[in-house]
Image: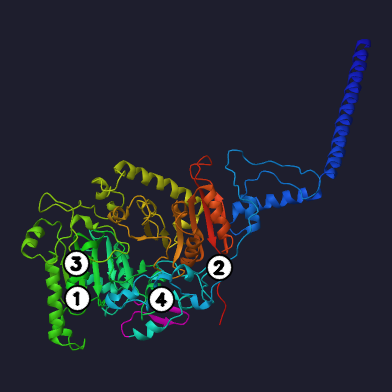
Amino acid sequence: NKTQEMAKENNSHHHAEAKRKRLIWILCVSGFCILSYVLGAWQTNTLPSSSSEVFSRKACAETKTQSKLSTSSEDEDESLSSSSSLSSSSSSEPVELDFESHHKLELKQKNQTIKYFEPCDMSLSEYTPCEDRERGRRFDRNMMKYRERHCPSKDELLYCLIPPPPNYKIPFKWPQSRDYAWYDNIPHKELSIEKAIQNWIQVEGERFRFPGGGTGFPRGADAYIDDISRLIPLTDGAIRTAIDTGCGVASFGAYLLKRDIVAMSFAPRDTHEAQVQFALERGVPAVIGIMGSIRLPYPARAFDLAHCSRCLIPWFQNDGLYLTEVDRVLRPGGYWILSGPPINWKKHWKGWERTQEDLKQEQDSIENAARSLCWKKVTEKGDFSIWQKPINHIACKKLKRAHKSPPICTKAVQPDFAWYKELESCVTPLPEANSPDEFAGGALEDWPDRAFAVPPRIIQGTIPEINAEKFKEDNEVWKERIAYYKQILPELSRGRFRNIMDMNAYLGGFAAAIVKYPSWVMNVVPVDAEKQTLGAIYERGFIGTYQDWCEAFSTYPRTYDLIHAGGLFSMYENRCDVTLILLEMDRILRPEGTVVFRDTVEMLTKIQSITNGMKWTSRIMDHEKGPFIPEKILLAVKSYWTGPSA
């Protein structure tokens, strides 16, 4: 028993000792916490009071910028600045809070004064700088020169924002946009009245409706194209690119799209007010243009099909000069379709209010011009006549020995050069062929294989320093880029951006990478680009044009949803004022449209400093391969605003 009592006494002693130690430990920890709190409070009171405020504002700005593009320009400047310290405005020494990663490039421009651009007058809401009708009246009417491009001089340049009309609405999404457009966006009823019988366009309340009709489509464009498909193959992939001359509201191009044929439609800015604007509002490719005294801005051998339906182009004049230009841009084996006067004149001459002799003479002149180009007449049936260009010039050269007018051009003519280049009365030579059944310049794959097949121009080495391996590498680059763009622009694959422009298209990799999206791309190759690649882009089955970005583009305001500009501003920074290029981008971009810039950090910060004054919001982002790549991305959005009501 004594032993048990001693054991119990020892246990109680140990318990008391353990409790005493635990109590001492708790008191020590509590004392340390209190001391830390007191010291922290004393240190905080010695800091300038504005530091915490600035830090909070900085953190909020960074969070907002990562989640939204609509951050205010003040927040953006803070969140995008590479300054890693936040200093107080107090006279005491500033405390630096450095949370930045130190591998990033420093953005040297700070505290820039923003220059805000005012809206232009509402009378300029549909301003097209290089197709201004008042300026055009100063030029010769011969060969329609007064309707060609005539850009403003330096003292005529505008440094203001083209205003959208009051009540402007975001256009309908494709495919609904093919058939409908908002009246407030293009408030012109002229075509609905002037072309009422021909079903070009109808007004239904606050909307326009496009029934698919046209001057030459009494049963609609869809039925009209079905008639053509009974005469030549349209759906086997051999015909992919088309050019529609004098396109009206581009219903022909609109209904070709459902057959996987993409048309470059063009028409002048003339008495048919806003026809090209209607086409683009519908989500159909189109540009302002005219068959005049200079070449069309496309390379040689670009289109599988050329079309004219009552397009009012005098094919028979000037010794068939305009047909010679169609021959230049038509691919070997390509088709030219003509409907309307003078075709089937024996049936229609009374309705056309022309004499039979006049119409017969016009058709004979066209037939002779086509023969002089070595074209073969495929068929004349009903209201259609269709010719086909030869696949090479082996037989044509023999023919030209006997019939020398027009002669085959010399090799010095540069078939692909087409920027303000005057038309010439000679046949553009095709590349040499070794046999009568060989396609000059190389045969093309059928669509859709054509999009990723190596273009013949690259296979044959006609583009310096670009070979099949580099072409395939470029496709892989764009595959990675589009995967990244889908993260930062999720709407890209969902049809939000119907009309897309690539301002520096190179090999057309952007267009190819999004070929399955409900979008189309205007591939622009700058005339100042080191490598002229537009011909290869057309050989891939895409469309585009040449352009000097020191001048305005041949389109109406508010016609593109997304613009991509990769390396463009570094190309032009020493050639012209980049502010004017940005103002032109603002002109052609729709409200709430998006721009993706790719360039050096210095150039992007310069761009951002300008666009901050253009009612745009933006943020700079890392390259898709990570922060160590010097090239960065600037993602910008044009804000929604409209001009005042009258």
Q: Does 244 appear in magenta?
A: no
Determine whether 40 is above or below 644 in the image: above
Q: Nearer the viewer, mark 2 or mark 4?
A: 4
Mark before the other along the chain sequence, 1 or 4: 4
Q: Residue furthest top?
A: 3
Instruction: Give the residue type that dot 2 points to.
Output: Tyr
Q: Indicate the quadrant containing the C terminus: top left, top right, bottom left or bottom right.
A: bottom right
Q: Which residue is mark 2?
A: 640
Q: In the depicted view, which residue is nearer to us: 580 or 192?
A: 580
Q: Nearer the viewer, mark 3 or mark 2?
A: 3
Q: Which residue is mark 3?
A: 425
Q: Position of residue 553 (x, y in %)?
A: 41, 65
Helix, strand or loop status at disc 1: loop
Q: Is there a contact, CB below 8 Å, between mark 3 and mark 2?
A: no
Mark before the other along the chain sequence, 1 or 2: 1
Instruction: Identify the residue shown where x is 51% and y is 71%.
Output: 162
Q: Is residue 494 left or right of residue 512?
A: right
Q: Which residue is mark 4?
A: 135
Instruction: Give the residue type that dot 4 points to.
Output: Arg
Q: Which residue is mark 1?
A: 317
Instruction: Give the residue type that dot 3 points to.
Output: Ser
Q: Is there a contact, CB below 8 Å, between mark 3 and mark 1?
A: no
Q: Residue furthest left?
A: 402
Q: Is there a contact, CB below 8 Å, between mark 2 and mark 4?
A: no
Mark before the other along the chain sequence, 4 or 3: 4
**Alpha carbon of mark 3 to alpha carbon of mark 1: how far?**
12 Å
Q: In the depicted view, which residue is nearer to us: 88 or 173?
A: 88
**Alpha carbon of mark 1 to alpha carbon of mark 4: how far?**
26 Å
**Alpha carbon of mark 3 to alpha carbon of mark 2: how far?**
49 Å
Q: Is there a contact, CB below 8 Å, between mark 1 and mark 4?
A: no
Secondary structure, magenta segment, majority class: loop
